[in-house]
Amino acid sequence: LTSIAIPDTVTSIGYGAFKEATLLNSITFGVNSQLASIENDTFYKTALTSIAIPDTVTSIGYGAFYKATSLNSITFGAGSLLNTIGFYAFSESALTSIAIPNTVTVIGTYAFYKATSLNSITFGANSQLTSIGYAAFRNASALTTIAIPDLVTSIGSNAFLSTGLTRVYLTEDLTIDGTTYAIGTSGSFFGADDVSFEEPPLEPLPLQPQQLPSLPLCF
């Protein structure tokens, strides 16, 4: 099996459904997909290179894409309902970037552990994220910056151990378990050392078209 198209009527892909399908490199969903969950170990050790998650999916289970070492791209729609990214979900994948849907509240333990190519993780302005699990980004060595959403109240120990993290962007001072990380200071941050805490960089203003002076018509 190298590719599969999942019918719109499927609501769940069960435990280990494609586990170790080492030739599976393509999976597609219809625009009217009703898929609600991707269960534990579903795509463990597959050869997927990319996947577009249907908006209706609310949970990605334990190890769903664990050791999918060719998976370098995952996308979510603007209407994504995703709530939970489970333990080890993308651990040891080849992801280089991911934009977390606003509806996600939990990033589980070891979710991106040893995702060594991951250099960009972004959250929307209306992110509902409250919890980042233990060692969630441990050994994601290419990750150098991250913006922590305002609603985060829990970050597990060693969440950023052995990453390349040097900057953490905050819109306001962050207090976790009685420790405050203040904008304009630096220090350790859940396993990462010598991190500076900064306000997010300003978005560049869009360029405005220049008005050229009108020239007289010559006949």
Image (tube, grey):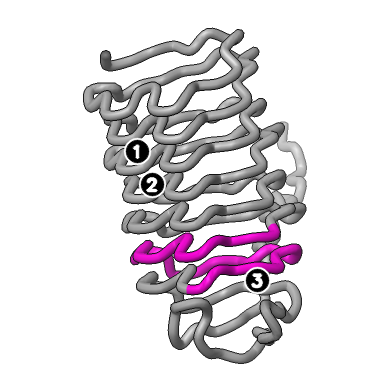
In terms of depth relative to the viewer, which is nearer, 40 or 116?
40
The residue that label 1 is drawn on is 71
Mark 3 vs mark 2, CA separation in Å? 23 Å
Secondary structure beneath dot 1 equals: loop
Check disc 3 and give the amino acid type: Pro
Check disc 2 and give the amino acid type: Leu
Check disc 1 and give the amino acid type: Leu
Name which quarter of the figure residue 139 lies in.
bottom left
Give coordinates of residue 80: x percent, y percent. 67, 34
The reply to whether the C-beta atoms of the residues labelled 1 and 2 are less than 8 Å apart is yes
Secondary structure beneath dot 2 equals: loop
Q: Which residues are magenta?
A: 130-157
Crowding near the residue tagged with mark 3, few <14, some 14–19, many ≥20 C-alpha atoms within 10 Å: some
Give coordinates of residue 56: x percent, y percent. 66, 26
Mark 1 vs mark 2, CA separation in Å? 6 Å
Image point 48% across, 23% down: which residue? 14
In terms of depth relative to the viewer, which is nearer, 96 or 179?
179
The reply to whether the C-beta atoms of the residues labelled 3 and 2 are less than 8 Å apart is no
The residue that label 3 is drawn on is 200
Q: Is residue 41 magenta?
A: no
In terms of depth relative to the viewer, which is nearer, 208 or 11?
11
Name which quarter of the figure residue 200 lies in.
bottom right
Indicate which label's residue lies in the foreground, 3 or 2.
2
Q: Is residue 82 left or right of residue 162?
A: right
First-in-chain label (3 vs 2): 2
